[in-house]
Structure formats: C-alpha cells, structure tokens
Image (cartoon, rainbow, N blue to C red):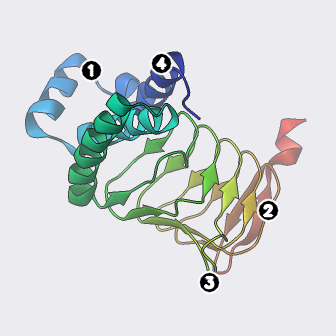
C-alpha cells in the first residue's frame, strides 16, 4: 500500500521497469507521439498509483488531486478497456496488452503481477468473495480468477483458464475449471 511519497516513487519505478527496459529512447518518443497502447497503459498505472497515494493520505488537497487522477485514469481506462480500483495490486504491476482487464475492488494481489489481457479478477455471487494472490502472479490472456480463491506466490495461470478454487505456491494451472498441470517446487531445489 502506498503511504509515503517514497512508496509512490518505488511503486512507479517498479511498474515502469518493463516498459523502460523494453523500449529505446527513440521507441519511447514514437510511443508518446502515436499514443501507443503500451505508453497509455504506463500512464494508466501512473494515475492509478497517484490515486492510491491520495486515497491513503487524505487531506483536502489530496482529495481534489485524487478526483483529478481518477478522471485521467478513467479516460485512459475507458479507451483501453481497463478497470483497476485502487489498492488492489502491489508494486510491479505489468499489463502486457490492452483490452478488458476488470478487477473487483476487494481483490488483493501481491507484487509483480503480470496481466496479459482479457482478464477478470472478480467475485462469484457474494460481493465480499474476491480473489487474493501472492507475489509474481502471471495471468495468461483470457484467464479469470472468480470468487473467494486464494493463490500462493509464483503461480502461473494458463490462457483462458477459469480459476474457481485455491492453489498453493509455485504451480502452473490451466483449464476450465483450472487444475494443476505442473508443480514448480521440484525446480527450486
């Protein structure tokens, strides 16, 4: 959770790591000029993190700033199909592609999550039943987390999988409904 300006800088730095190391200065200039989706996703995450900082540090000025950041985030999010509420993801969030990323406000996902697009992290029937996940979650394109599921650290969810039950650490899950197809614990010894 972003509490201080130092936290804000750290979150932004971690969120931008992939973008900053993927593209040359010339490519970044072209991305800005063309308003490329990767650049716009970077801006979306920036406004999300600034919104979180203002939300977690309520003052009159931060309330006004937060409204501004929400507006900017929503304009970009509506164009890209992304809806992420504040304080749902840890630092290092990567959104690889635009298009239909929907997250429940009660979901809690750890650091360094990768979303490949067309993901839903949402409730089942009860509003309180939202997914939780540890660090280094990798959601393949079209993968969904539904209901009060809990995922451990370093979980990879295959493309188009529907996760409706909990899984531990270091696993690869896929299918509808999702099941373990590979246990990565043996590679960590």
Among the two numbered marks 2 and 1 on one chain, the one whose residue lies closer to the N terminus:
1
| Gap between marks 1 and 4 measured at Cα | 28 Å
Viewer-side residue, 173 vs 92: 92
Between circles 1 and 4, the one closer to the viewer is 4
> Residue 101: where, in percent of width, then height?
41, 61
Q: Earlier in the sequence, mark 1 or mark 4?
A: 4
Question: Which of the two discs, 1 and 3, labels the residue nearer the N terminus?
Answer: 1
Q: Disc 3 and disc 2: Cα gap in Å?
A: 20 Å
Q: Which mark is residue 125?
A: 3
Residue 185: image tag? none
SS state under label 2: loop
Residue 3: give x, y in percent of width and height. Answer: 56, 27
Q: Nearer the viewer, residue 113 or 10?
A: 10
Tag 2 residue = 167
Q: Between marks 4 and 2, how big is the CA–CA gap?
A: 35 Å
Q: Toward the viewer: 1 or 96?
A: 1
- Residue at 43 percent across and 54 percent down: it is 84
N-terminal label among 3 and 2: 3
Circle 4 is placed at which residue position? Answer: 5
Q: Does label 4 or label 2 sit earlier along the sequence?
A: 4
Please tell me which of labels 3 and 4 falls first in the chain.
4
**Alpha-carbon distance for marks 1 and 3?**
46 Å
Q: Residue at x 62, y 38 (%)?
A: 111
- Answer with left or right where residue 67 lies relative to residue 143: left
Q: Residue 130's image quarter?
A: bottom right
Q: Are marks 1 and 3 in contact (CB under 8 Å)?
A: no
CA distance separating discs 3 and 4: 37 Å
Above or below, 14 against 67 in this view is above
């Amino acid at each position: 959770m972003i509490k201080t300006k130092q936290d804000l800088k750290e979150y932004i730095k971690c969120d931008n790591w992939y973008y900053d190391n993927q593209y040359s200065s010339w490519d970044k200039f072209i991305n800005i000029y063309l308003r490329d989706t990767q650049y716009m996703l970077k801006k979306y995450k920036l406004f999300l993190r600034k919104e979180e900082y203002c939300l977690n540090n309520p003052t009159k000025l931060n309330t006004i700033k937060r409204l501004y950041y929400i507006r900017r985030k929503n304009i970009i999010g509506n164009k890209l199909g992304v809806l992420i509420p504040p304080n749902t993801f840890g630092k290092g969030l990567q959104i690889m592609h635009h298009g239909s990323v929907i997250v429940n406000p009660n979901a809690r996902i750890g650091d360094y999550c990768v979303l490949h697009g067309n993901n839903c992290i949402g409730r089942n029937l009860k509003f309180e039943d939202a997914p939780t996940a540890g660090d280094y979650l990798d959601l393949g394109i079209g993968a969904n987390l539904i209901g009060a599921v809990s995922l451990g650290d370093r979980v990879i969810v295959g493309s188009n999988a529907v996760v409706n039950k909990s899984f531990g650490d270091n696993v690869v899950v896929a299918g509808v409904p999702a099941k373990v197809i590979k246990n990565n614990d043996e590679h960590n010894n």
